[in-house]
Image (cartoon, grey):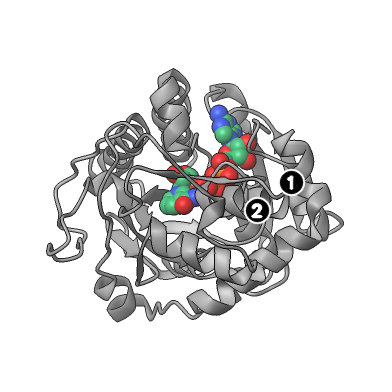
Amino acid sequence: MRIVVTGGAGFIGSHFVRQAIKGNYSAFADAELVVLDKLTYAGNKQNLAEVADSSRLRFVEGDICDGRLVGETLRGADAVVHFAAESHVDRSIAGADEFVRTNVLGTQTLLNAATEHGVGKFVHVSTDEVYGSLESDDAPWTEEEALKPNSPYSASKASSDLLALAAHRTHGLPVCVTRGSNTYGHHQYPEKIIPLFVTNLLDGLKIPLYGDGENVRDWLHVDDHCQGIALVAADGKPGEVYNVGGGIELTNRQVTGRLLTLLNMDESMVRYVADRKGHDRRYAMDISKISGQLGYQPTVTWEKGLAETIDWYTAHRDWWEPLKG
Ligand code: NAD
């Protein structure tokens, strides 16, 4: 079996690849993995160093918008797990063009090639942000929720979700869409809130908290997120969407407070900054579909996951220092 993993040098994609190569997903224990990654600012071959010597891993450096390369890479593939994307909301607010190019055009380029070469499964990795924003007393989103994305990032992801589902309806491509919630863990680029705050604090720098800090996110450890994606890749029903949440709803202030406690620091390290434009208030996911149908359950507790993440950044200054510089 051959699986093409786009964006496999990024945060979540590299975790999926490392786990799959180590045999931690039974359905793919013998699979060959072909990583297709452009190595943008967010991609890092070092993320795959642990498994780089495996005869089951091949790395192709290239752009998912390059139709010829994508066609060559997908020829003979049994499955595609599509992580590659521009992924940072703040960058999309500063300039959205690259988000449309990679997230929309890149996804369509992959869908074209997957259809042409009869790929047996296409997992499109998406985000809870496509649903928009909840108020504090709203019920968590199910997969039936209408898409109401607010940022250029989430709008580009929602567009690609619809194109992926259209490829299923129109061409019969066996597509599944996963919508993961806010993911944290080791190897996350230090622009996202948890690694940004941890690395700032390790350097004795203040941490910038947006607005009133009361925005709520549904936190999900990268290991659980990838378990969910692996279950969908193995047994997800074509044409279906699966929410993958962590069930840990916390305000940014609560996340900040926990980080300060674990690093023996106090509120004086927080610098309140003007709110992000169009900042979504709350995300929360109903995961009963993937739990009931595929047996998914998040297993990494917030306490353990966060402590281990801090330990990893403490021990891997060589990984993040050049990126922050
Ligand atoms: P990331 O930014 O860490 O990694 C993205 C990877 O894609 C990088 O390796 C980059 O080099 C590659 N890439 C970017 N543009 C490319 C292109 N044109 N061609 C080929 N490769 C390209 O992202 P991440 O946080 O690992 O997110 C992976 C996926 O999961 C994304 O689709 C994202 O939307 C989704 N997601 C992320 C989160 C989260 O909290 N990080 C939550 C839910 C869903």
Image point 63% across, 47% down: which residue? Answer: 8
Local crowd size for mark 2, using a 10 Å CA cut-off: few (<14), some (14–19), many (≥20):
some
Side (left or right) of 176 relative to 82: left
Helix, strand or loop under label 1: helix
Side (left or right) of 218 relative to 8: left
Are the two marked residues, 2 and 1, in contact with CB atoms closer than 8 angstroms?
no
Decide which of 238, 44 is in the foreground and name it.
Answer: 44
Amino acid at the residue labelled 1? Trp
Numbered disc in front, either 2 or 1:
2
Give the distance between the C-alpha atoms of the residues marked 2 and 1, in whole angstroms.
13 Å
Side (left or right) of 191 relative to 95: right
Query: Could you tell me residue 193's position as x and y percent?
Result: 51, 49
Amino acid at the residue labelled 2? Leu
The residue carrying mark 2 has its beta carbon less than 8 Å from ligand 1: no
Query: Could you tell me residue 202's position as x and y percent?
Result: 71, 54
Query: Could you tell me residue 121's position as x and y percent?
Result: 44, 54
Earlier-in-chain disc, 2 versus 1: 2
The residue carrying mark 1 has its beta carbon less than 8 Å from ligand 1: no
Residue at the disc numbered 2: 201
Image point 23% across, 44% down: which residue? Answer: 169
Local crowd size for mark 1, using a 10 Å CA cut-off: few (<14), some (14–19), many (≥20):
some
Residue at the disc numbered 1: 320
Image point 62% across, 27% down: which residue? Answer: 69
Query: Could you tell me residue 284's position as x and y percent?
Result: 27, 62
* Residue 259 picture quarter: bottom right
How many labels were placed on the picture? 2
Note whether residue 55 is visible: no
Viewport quadrant of the C terminus = top right
Decide which of 302, 43 is in the foreground and name it.
Answer: 302
Helix, strand or loop under label 2: helix
